[in-house]
Image (cartoon, coloured by chain):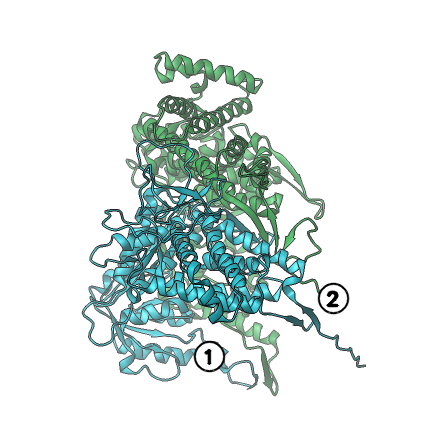
Amino acid sequence: MSRICKRKPAVCTDEPLSDSNICQKIALLRNILSTSYGPTGRLKQIHNNVGGHVLTTSTSTALLKRVDMSEPLLKLISTSVQHHTACYSDCGLFMGIFMLRLIENTQKYNVRTVAAAKSYKRLVEECNMYLKGDSCGCKVSVDFSSCDSLVALARSMITSKPACMLNSRETQHISSLIAQAFLYSIPCNSPGVACFGRTVTIGIEGQPVSDSSVFPGLLVDVPEMLQLADLKRLGSGPFKVVVFSASLSGDMSEVGDVILEIHRGVDPEFDLLQQLLKLGEQVVKDKVSLFACQKVVHPVLQHYFREHGVVVIERLGLALMEPFIQISGAQAVASPCSPVPAEAYGLVRGLCFQSCGSRELLHLLPPKDAAISTLVLCHRNETMLEELKMTCQRAEHVLRLTLREPYALPGGGCTETLLATHITHMNQSTATITAAALGVSHSEFLMAVKAFCSSLHAVALSLEHDGQDCLIDLTYAHRWVSDIYPRTSARQTCGCGLVEDRSDLEKTPLNSACHTFSPVFLENTDNQPRILDSFSAKLNALNVAVEMANFVLDVKYIIKDIN
Amino acid sequence: MRVLEYGPSCKQYSSALKMSGSASVAQRRHIGLQQLEAASASTHTFLGPNKHLKFIRDEDAGDSVLVSTCPRLLQRLELDGSVGQLLHETVQAQQRLFHSGTGALVFLAGVWSRVALECLNRGMSVLDIKTAMSKALEVSLQVCKHSAVSVREVRPGPALKPAGRDTTQCNLKHSRHFSSQTESTKTDITSIADAVSHGCKTSMRLVLKACMLQSREDAQNSSLDIQKLVACSIPGPSEERSCVLHGYVTLLPVQQASVLQSLQGQRLNIALVSGDLCEKYRHVGFNRPAHITHITHCVSSASLEERWIENALKILHEFGVGVVLVHGTVDVKLKDRCSSVLVIEGVESTVVKDFSACTGAVPVSYITQLDERCVGRGVTVSRCEEHESVRIEAASSSLVTAVITSSVPAKLQILEDEFWSCAHRLHHALKDGKLLRGSGITEILCIQKLHQHQHQQTETGNPQENLVLELMAEAWMDYVSTLMLNSGSVASKAEAWTAIAHQMRRYEDGEPMVRAFRDLFAAGVYDNMTVKCEAWRRALDLVLLVLQSDTEIITGGSEDLYNDLMYL
């Protein structure tokens, strides 16, 4: 009996941004992101309420990956932030908060979508010009001749994630490890096109953070039956290596999900095992000492190898394949059916046991020019370790981005206040001309500037979560926090640490009306910003945020197929 | 029309109410901290040596269980919400690593949550609370570091003697190991064991015997190898029958009783199987093809199994195997048909490893892999008449089994937990080489140090820091007084506070520590250093994580499920 179901018509929402429910959700998302922002940001506990693991985080990547949005517009926003962080590893929260504020402010100040889009585009270009230009006083050059700015960049990223739960000593230790791992990943003296190496991150739960360290080469779990005596028997390296990407479990998964008809007397399992053993024979004959496989190796084959003194590493996993190939120069063999070609073999300089805290690991020593290292991170509990691992990986990536653009921006909200001050000041006198050139009305353009700048201020304000007042100084346009307890010993500095406080420095609460001024550049100062943000990441976040805000503002209908 | 979809929902922890103007935060209620405090309160009776058992009934399943420790309680409670889950994870992690210290961890998580809540009420910022509480913990950890005593200085309490009551035929031949101990080592390890027995004298006596059995070759260097220790719970015989035996002891399957009879007294060959011993078993990572049709006169699966069993028996016979230890399960039919081979299933992998190392046997995944080189030699089996169990020994092994018996089956789990926590306490005492004075003395020293710190007014500091240090000192006070109340030395917490204050004054007036705290210290109780410090750190980590959290996000629920929540 067949049944016919009538298809339901699609559901259409027009002017989604005028829907109060959608606006509420946008505000909620913005609230979640802005309460997570910065070193004192509040943590979010994400779980499924049925006993699943609890993720404690304030990182946009982790947050947005786990949380599904019900509204298409929110999904769009979430995806764009995730895409940004996948490429730049930093400024995800900045992008989210700025974008959502821009959307909200455009509605609040009642700027027409078309006018807003044109104006914002213009303003973000001014920002780009300002930040990229030589005269930009807030940009900091990353000095590769010393570790200081690299460590400062890494430290800023770690301190901005409080769920890592590090004290200052631990923060310093981890920051220098990140800088060290980054330096290990730069190949030296390699001819031709230089290619970045890799940093593999391993987490060990239950050990103090101070046990964390970085090793050149690769660390993998010790194969189950490998003992010290086996390594001693191997002698000293280098050792011949082969690595398989195919499963050597001896099953028929390679043929795919098809219907098999097997005749009586045929035992495919047995035949496949014989084939594996033939492969084993060749490998032993070719004097291989280390046999690695991304997937499972049949226990009978493993047994055969052990008897012939070959070390087997199975279940290496996809993530470790690439670094393994880089470190050994081997080519991954994709099929166990044909003999291993001679050029597929690689070399490892040596093998040894390395104990990290309570865990024993097998250390594959790299050849001198291989830029592979393993960052072993230890922390007391799982949820903190998770955040630390993620943060360290992102920080190392940000350091790599500095090689492309060797700059950093002052953090602690100072870049935002500076940009907002610059934009307001620049457009004060030229507003009429610019508005005419863009084809929008003068007042609309001024409103757009206001919406844009107060969105930037909103980001800077989001750094404060304990009810303290945020201020801006009227000379350098850096961000300040009013200090509740006057500390006598240390001089107070601005958010990024570049400007030192002095009695004649005039300050006013952020987002309060004040006269416009052009920020003065601080020259000839010995101070270095303590808090640095990635230049590339921030610039991209700024641009994509504006583009996405314009896009979301422009959505007229949402059509949903509910069948 | 709008369609409701599944989506994540949010709960806000603390609601900050913006007042007119810039004055902020009128109301601060932190639900997460309150939950943590409440969850902790239910475990207060677990603190100290006299543990009050809790009876947990599962209304749905209709069964009930007795618990006496935090990990077991939390396992059963099924706390919902992220805070309950985080508490559970923290306790599990501590338990996995140390097998003790969870009572203090949960207690402190509760009282420190109250400290944090109090600070929030007084208008302190989260950052300041975090900094000050971390400082207070640092001070307390320093106290531990400085007040630790070497295990050699442990003042022995009422000594634990390796009682001779279980000189059964099973371990008679090992009794010489006891007499071969030099007098000094024996006293050393006995008094250390006594100091960390925490009221579980019977269990600690078992541990001590395990220790002596293990170190028979090196009497000078008594230590406890946790890796070479197994426990076997046997319901039926009374608790006095509990004993420690060399080798691997496990319940004897009924079918195997006659096999054992014929194997006793021989030197046997052994095979180790790391997977299941049955025809259907395939190693991990082997994917069975989904659609296979066998063409013509296909062999039925019954006869396939039959052929496999015959083959397996043939192999075992061929290599003269007398004992097979299987990590997984064993085919029922095979078990029935083994007339000359003892097959034991569900053997822990540490045991398999030990037999591999001591007999030369190589663990195999499939019985067909077995060859001459994989077979180990020189194993003996014997039957322990008292409790239907079998003992399998390799001469060179230091593996020992604690046989834990009870005529009340419900108590077996509790006794086994107790045994393991004693074993780990002794293990860590020997590993650290240091111990902390127990029964609350270390915590009282912490109170004192925190008071001293309050008087050293730091000039750069936050004026409210003193408040936090005072509250933390009070939390320790609460800890010690609960300990005293649970141990029955006082009738009320108020009485405990007076007693503590009195003893602290005596100490501050210059009396030596042991004299000043003699009322507390009469028992000669010591605590593990690393275990305690880690429990403290983990408790504060948990409190600070929750303190800094403002939102709980639940993924995957339907929108009608939680009416009071917001949805994204």
Q: Amino acid at mark 1?
A: Phe
Task: Give how far across and how far down residue A349 sits, in percent.
Answer: 22, 66
Q: Colour of chain B?
A: green
| Residues at circles 2 and 1 in contact by the CB criterion of under 8 Å | no
Q: Colour of chain A?
A: cyan
Q: How far separated are the C-alphas under marks 2 and 1?
A: 61 Å
Q: Amino acid at mark 2?
A: Met
Residue beneath label 2, please? B1
- The mark found on residue A212 in the picture is none
Residue beneath label 1, please? A270
Which quadrant holds the C terminus of chain A?
A: bottom right
Which quadrant holds the N terminus of chain A?
A: bottom right
Helix, strand or loop status at disc 1: helix
Determine if residue A354 is in view: no
Callout in the foreground (2, 1): 2
Q: State left or right for residue A80 relative to residue A409.
A: right
